[in-house]
Each structure stands twice: as C-alpha cells, then as structure tokens.
Image (tube, grey):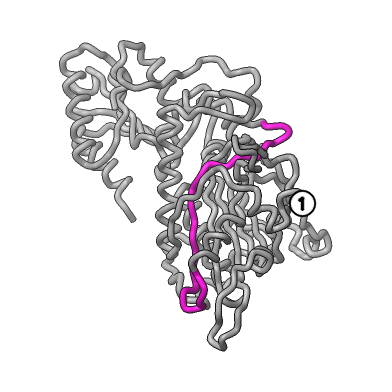
Amino acid sequence: MRLTRYFLPVMKETPADAQIASHRYMLRAGMIRQQAAGIYSWLPLGLKVLRRIEQIVHEEQQRAGHLPVLMPTIQPADLWQESGRYNAYGPEMLRVRDRHDRDMLYGPTNEEMITDMFRGYISSYKSLPLTLYHIQWKFRDEIRPRFGVMRGREFLMKDGYNFDLTKEDALHAYNRHLVSYLRTYERMGLKAIPMRADGGPIGGDYTHEFLILAETGESDVFYDSAVLDLHLGDRQVDYDDHVACKAVMDEFTGPYARTDETHDDDLFLEIPEERRSRGRGIEVGQIFYFGTKYSEPMGAVVVNDAGERVPVHMGSHGIGVSRLLGAIIEASHDEKGIIWPEGVTPFHCGIVNLKQGDAAADKACEDLYAALLVKGLEPLYDDREERAGGKFATMDLIGLPWRITVGPRGLKNGVVELTSRRTGESEELTPDVAVARLEQIYAPH
C-alpha cells in the first residue's frame, strides 16, 4: 500500500480524554474513531490489525477441532427467560422491543442461543463431543465505558461452547481450550497467564481468566513469578490426547496465579518470597465449565448408550478479539508509539523514501515495493512529499516492526537501511538482502 493512497488520519496531539496508552495511540494512529461513549468505528489500519487477530483465533480454534458458526447479534428474550438469566443479568444487557412488541436483546453472550441450536438437532450421544464457536459483535451497556476498546460497550468477541456426554469429557474440552488459548496468545507475541477466577454471571465451578500483566490493568493479580517462564513454544500437543492436554493444563496452572476475587493469602504466603509477585492484569479471555446449568432447564438432552435421556455437560470459552488489540498495545509500546509483534502487524514493513522525486531513490523504493509483494509480504510505502522527520515519526507511531529507509547517500554505496522498531538497531544491506531478511523473519514456523 502506498501511503498517498491510504486513509491514515494520524494526529499529532493526544486527545484529552485518552487516559491509557492503547487509547491514545489508537486515536493518534488513525485506527479508530469514537462515535458514542464506548462505541467506535474501525478505520483501515485498526481494522487490518483486528482482522489479523481474528484470523489467528480462527486458525487455532479450528486446529483444536472446533467448528465455526455465526449467530445473530439480536436475540429473542424468551430463550433467556427459559434459562432464568433474563432478569438476573442486570442493566448491562440492552433490552429492546421490535415492531411486533416482542422482547428482544442485543446479545452480551450466547449460552442460551447455542443451547437452543444444539437441542434442535442433536439427540444421541453418538454426535458428541461437539464444540461450536463464532466471532461476533457483542454489546454490554457498561456504566462507565473507558480506556477505548479496552472497556467499550460494543466489542468483537470469540465465544465457543462445548457439548459433552460426561463431566470427564467436558473437563477434557476445558483443558483443550486452555492449550489452544495459550498457543493463540503466543502467536500474537503475548504472555497471557491463566489465573483462577470467579464465574460471575456465566457461572460454573471451573474457570480461568487469561491475563496480560500491565500497569494499566483493571484487576489486581497475585502470582508465582515461575509462571512467567512457561511457554508452549513449538511444542506440538495432540488435542485428542486427554493425558497430554491435562499435563499442559497442570503445568501452566500449577504455579499460584489468581485474580483478587479468588486470592488466598495463606496459599500465597507458601510461595518462596523471592517469587511472590503482585501486579495488575488485563483480561483477554476466560474459559468455563458449568456442567448442566443451561442444558437441564432448556432440555438439551441426549440418549446415552444405556438408552437414558441425560442433559449434556457444557462449557463456554471466550476471547476478547477487539480488547486484545488494546492489550497488545498496552504490553508493547514506547514513548514514540506502538510496537506491533510480527504476528499481528498491519503491514510487514514500512518503506521510507528520504528524497521523494529523486530518480534513483524513487526507483529503488518501487523495486523494493514490488519485490516484497512478490514474496507475499505487505509493505507500506511512505511516498509522501514530506520531510524525513515526519515520515519517521509516522512509522514510529503506527509501530510497524521493520522499516526500510532509502536515500541517495546509501544508494551510492548500493545499500538501504533495515531498522527494527523494537530495538532501534539498524543494519545497512543491499536491497535484495533486505528483502530476503524480511522473508526469513516472516516465514511460517
């Protein structure tokens, strides 16, 4: 993409109402525009990152054997009345009536609708196990929406639901989800810690939140610092292997890690003092097992191998897709702007032409641009008639991981400059070598 043909309304000044880094930089980098309190339009750069995050979530869900569906944003109230949650959910639920005077709601979550879908089609244990998920916009009428997409009223969320014959099978689904979430976050360059949490309005006896440590986090968290050394890396885990998934679950939830709602000071004090840590965290996902809480009152039953009609065991599993974008910025930025991890960057690199209109510099940039496209990479070419300082400031603000700088002086020696946004380190390379280096960096592992 050429910057002269792109819609990137960057701002030099920080908006007065933006209190945290992600909100400031998303507004300044022209990623979002506020339409109402807690409600945003996604501009091209922001939407590009959002779609990259969404794609990673899709890939890891399907790798784990989960099947995508798409449910509506508007739900009939009678399903929620059937489960008993319609009046219990609280004022966060946006309730509406249609033109036929039927009670409807803008879905904050989908347990009732997915249970209704299941009971309409599945009647035998032979159809189990089954996990369905979707990525859809949700609405929760927060009393104080703030911090941009971190605490908005409208948000994009992945929610998945497993249906299993027994508690044992459902707990395997729980463990499988934990493993898939760990891999999802690592692909985004994040360290997300699974922490024992409270079930809240979803309910359930088993639940873990995934939190990213950040000073701007909403939750107080207490943890054994040993958990920071745990990574899946390139480890391959067979999602159908109950023992392997349980082993990863035990490994990553073994060290003490809890939110303030479930914190146990006596257990915390048993940790060696040098590993006893406290901080703040941003929630980016949560998994639940809640047994027959929804299937029993809503009649989601199957016939088991003994011919008995039994309610299925269920769990739900959420990832805040739009919230993740803000969380990544909170975890990865500096005083100049965003620093995108390679896995979610909107463009793979930036090309900065130091002397637009110079024949040699223009040709070198065009050749680099074409060569990167051939390699399957997406460059952002700053071809504006703008001073070099302004071009560098824009690139630093929007946070592309790599920048290629092209100028007449370097070209006389046959080189361009490849710079890492994260470290600030630069290297002079021939254009061909610079392209090859980027191809290697972004090669699938």
Q: Quadrant of the N terminus?
A: top left
Query: In the image, what residue occupies the spot 27% across and 39% down?
Result: 377
Q: Vertical placement of 175 versus 124: above or below?
A: above
Query: Would residue 162 be seen by someone viewing this image from the given angle?
Result: yes
The residue located at (28%, 18%) in the rendering is: 383
Q: Quadrant of the C terminus?
A: bottom left
Instruction: Determine whether, in the image, residue 373 is placed left or right of residue 288.
Output: left
Residue found 53% across the figure and 57% down from its top? 160
x and y percentages locating residue 341 in the rendered image: 44, 42
Counting from the top left corner in percent of width and height, residue 132 is at 49, 60
Residue annotated with mark 1: 260
Whether residue 193 can be seen here:
no
Q: Residue furthest front?
A: 100
Circle 1: is it few (<14), some (14-19), or many (20+) Cα within 10 Å?
some
Image: 12 above or below 348: above
**Location of residue 13 by image quarter:** top right
Say whether residue 100 is left or right of residue 197.
Answer: left
Q: Residue furthest bottom?
A: 306
How many marks the image carries: the answer is: 1
Q: What residue is rendered at 75% in x and 63% in y?
A: 271
Who is closer to the viewer here, 414 or 365?
Answer: 365
In this rendered view, identify the residue nearer to me: 397 or 122. Answer: 122
Say if the magenta span includes residue 135.
Answer: yes
User: Which range is magenta?
Assistant: 122-145
User: Which sits in the foreground, 356 or 288?
Assistant: 288
Q: Amino acid at mark 1?
A: Asp
Image location (x, y in percent) of residue 415: 22, 28
Q: Position of residue 32 (x, y in %)?
A: 50, 27
Q: Quadrant of residue 234?
A: bottom left
Indicate yes or no whether the magenta region holds residue 115. Answer: no
Secondary element type, mark 1: loop
